[in-house]
Image (spheres, rainbow, N blue to C red):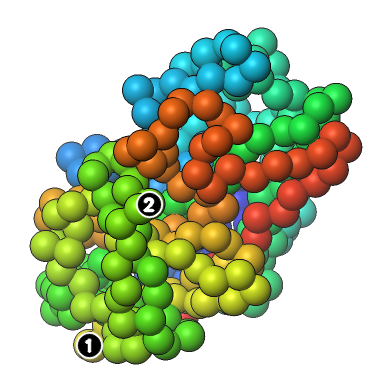
């Protein structure tokens, strides 16, 4: 089911399947979210839980038992219930059940909270441990934005660039797609904007480590118009930039976790980027999407 949020600045559509943003439009009707053309990539902005990326051989082991789970976890393909819905706010919930227990060993509650604040859509993904033991998980978001935003042919993909709020050098994670090679980190200087090109993603996503206690916003803009998007995550561990061959979109991805390392031993407790949550506790993954 598609639910709508609106205010004087934006209209947003949220699908209860996956708690996924499917549209963000401004007052002029400009669409910012990728419209899931299956010729390229048939999703809009999936929620990633309880893993980010792919498990080695699509399986993990916990407490002597193996669990099969496909890329980015199961939340993106499950129906959420609506807990609350006002004109500018919605809360959606997913609870552990027989289906999730076959794929993931823990009891959980996942609540995705969206709120419109002027030209900003704020999202908080809250992970609750409802089990009686420590819970292991990763979580993230995967929103895709139209590039170009202007559809009259006056702009090209490479007219767009991405600028980080904190300029400087970062650790870039190497990939042997679809897995990471955490032992191979390159220093990348992001003092200047990243110019988008389709060649940029030949080897999969571009992923950097985010230093602890650092809030890094990334702003997508064009040389030829005044419109753009700012992604502002809070306390995320990794930031991803992704697209695929010749596709007219780019994903700005805040992650609290990462795909398996090429040297993974398959044990969930040893997974790179795994988060730990004690019983009856909560973890909030928060990000803001600001439209201009």
* Crowd tier of the residue under label 1, counting other residues whose Cα lies within 10 Å: few below 14, some 14–19, many 20 or above: few
**Circle on res. 25:** none
**Secondary element at image label 2:** strand
Distance from disc 2 to disc 1, alpha carbons, whole Å, reads 38 Å
Quadrant in the picture for residue 277: top right
The answer to whether residue 104 is above or below residue 289 is: above
What residue is shown with label 2?
182
Quadrant in the picture for residue 250: bottom left
Q: Residue at image x 50%, y 44%?
A: 272
From the top left corner, tell me how far across and down residue 283 is, in percent: 74, 49
Work out whether residue 271 or residue 79 is closer to the camera in this orientation and state it. 271
The answer to whether 246 appears left or right of 168 in the picture is left
The answer to whether residue 213 is above or below residue 102 is: below
The answer to whether 120 appears left or right of 276 in the picture is left
Q: Residue at image x 72%, y 33%?
A: 135
From the top left corner, tell me how far across and down residue 126 is, in percent: 72, 47
**Circle on res. 224:** 1
The answer to whether residue 236 is above or below residue 216 is: above
From the top left corner, tell me how far across and down residue 10 is, in percent: 55, 69
**Secondary element at image label 1:** loop
Work out whether residue 128 or residue 227 is closer to the camera in this orientation and state it. 128
From the top left corner, tell me how far across and down residue 183 is, in percent: 35, 53
Residue 50 appears in the rendering: no
Q: Nearer the viewer, mark 2 or mark 1?
A: 2
Q: Residue at image x 84%, y 43%?
A: 281
The answer to whether 115 appears left or right of 289 in the picture is right
The mark nearer the N terminus, 2 or 1, is: 2
The answer to whether 150 appears left or right of 76 in the picture is left
- Image quadrant containing the N terminus: top right
Q: Residue at image x 52%, y 76%?
A: 216
């Amino acid at each position: 089911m598609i639910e709508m949020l609106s205010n004087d600045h934006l209209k947003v559509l949220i699908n209860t399947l996956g708690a996924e943003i499917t549209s963000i439009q401004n007052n002029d009707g400009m669409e910012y979210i990728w419209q899931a053309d299956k010729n390229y990539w048939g999703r809009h902005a999936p929620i990633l839980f309880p893993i980010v990326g792919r498990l080695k051989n699509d399986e993990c082991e916990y407490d002597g038992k193996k669990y099969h789970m496909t890329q980015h976890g199961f939340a993106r393909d499950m129906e959420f219930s609506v807990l609350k819905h006002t004109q500018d706010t919605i809360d959606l919930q997913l609870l552990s059940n027989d289906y999730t227990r076959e794929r993931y060993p823990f009891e959980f509650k996942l609540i995705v909270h969206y709120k419109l604040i002027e030209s900003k859509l704020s999202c908080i993904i809250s992970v609750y441990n409802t089990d009686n033991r420590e819970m292991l998980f990763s979580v993230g978001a995967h929103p895709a934005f139209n590039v170009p935003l202007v559809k009259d042919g006056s702009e090209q993909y490479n007219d767009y660039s991405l600028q980080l709020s904190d300029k400087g050098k970062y650790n870039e994670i190497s990939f042997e797609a679809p897995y990471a090679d955490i032992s191979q980190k390159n220093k990348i200087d992001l003092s200047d904007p990243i110019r988008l090109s389709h060649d940029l993603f030949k080897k999969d996503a571009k992923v950097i480590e985010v230093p602890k206690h650092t809030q890094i916003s990334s702003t997508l803009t064009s040389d030829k118009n005044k419109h753009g998007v700012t992604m502002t995550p809070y306390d995320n561990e990794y930031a991803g930039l992704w697209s695929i061959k010749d596709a007219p979109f780019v994903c700005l991805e805040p992650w609290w976790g990462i795909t398996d390392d090429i040297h993974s031993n398959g044990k969930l407790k040893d997974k790179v980027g795994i988060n730990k949550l004690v019983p009856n506790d909560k973890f909030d993954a928060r990000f803001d999407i600001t439209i201009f």
